[in-house]
Image: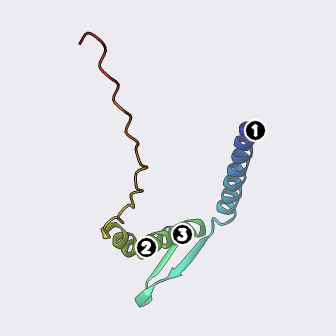
Amino acid sequence: MTGLIRLLKWILKAAVFFVLFAFALNNQQDATVHLAFGQQWRAPMTLIVLVAFALGMVVGVLGMLPGWWARRQRPAPAVAVAPQAAVTAMPASPPPDGV
């Protein structure tokens, strides 16, 4: 069963790779990104999409940092300790004869 799941995962990864590869091959023409103050950046469309994706990931991680930092600085909650079960004392056995 695990062999089948591995195979399906491999096929899915290969399909995603080939779709992205086809996208890159079909979008090799230059595109222009108009930035602030009249600046322009000309690059292949695939590179522009890749840079936009990477910048989006960076902005997302930076947006999540304050929450992570707050949770990390918070003291750990006290762990409730369950009361121990009543332990019945076993009667001491008498010492062996001759001692």
Q: Residue at x 71, y 58 (%)?
A: 19
Residue 63, by quadrant, is: bottom left
Give the left or right position of residue 42, taking residue 92 as reference.
Answer: right
- Choose between 38 and 89: the one closer to the eye: 89
Q: What is the secondary structure assignment of the residue under circle 2? A: helix
Residue bearing mark 3: 53
From the top left corner, tell me how far across and down residue 5 is, in percent: 73, 43
Camera-side mark, 1 or 2: 1
- Choose between 8 and 76: the one closer to the eye: 76
Q: What is the secondary structure assignment of the residue under circle 3? A: helix
Residue 70, by quadrant, is: bottom left
Residue 50, compared with residue 4, is above or below; it is below
Q: Residue at x 49, y 69 (%)?
A: 57
Sequence-wise, which precedes: disc 1 or disc 2?
1
Instruction: Identify the mark at residue 64; answer none if there is no mark.
Output: 2
Looking at the rendering, in which quadrant would you find the N terminus?
top right
Please give the count of numbered marks on the rendered protein.
3
Q: Are marks 1 and 2 in contact (CB under 8 Å)?
A: no
Camera-side mark, 3 or 2: 2
Sequence-wise, which precedes: disc 1 or disc 3?
1
Residue 97, compared with residue 29, is above or below; it is above
Residue type highlighted by circle 1: Met
Q: Residue at x 70, y 41 (%)?
A: 6
At label 3, counting other C-alpha atoms closer than 10 Å, the crowd grade (few under 14, some 14-19, many 20 or more) is: few
How far apart are the two marked residues, 1 and 2, measured between alpha carbons? Answer: 38 Å
Give the left or right position of residue 42, taking residue 65 as reference.
Answer: right
From the top left corner, tell me how far across and down residue 99 is, in percent: 23, 13
Q: Are marks 3 and 2 in contact (CB under 8 Å)?
A: no
From the top left corner, tell me how far across and down residue 79 is, in percent: 38, 61
Residue bearing mark 1: 1
Residue 45, by quadrant, is: bottom right
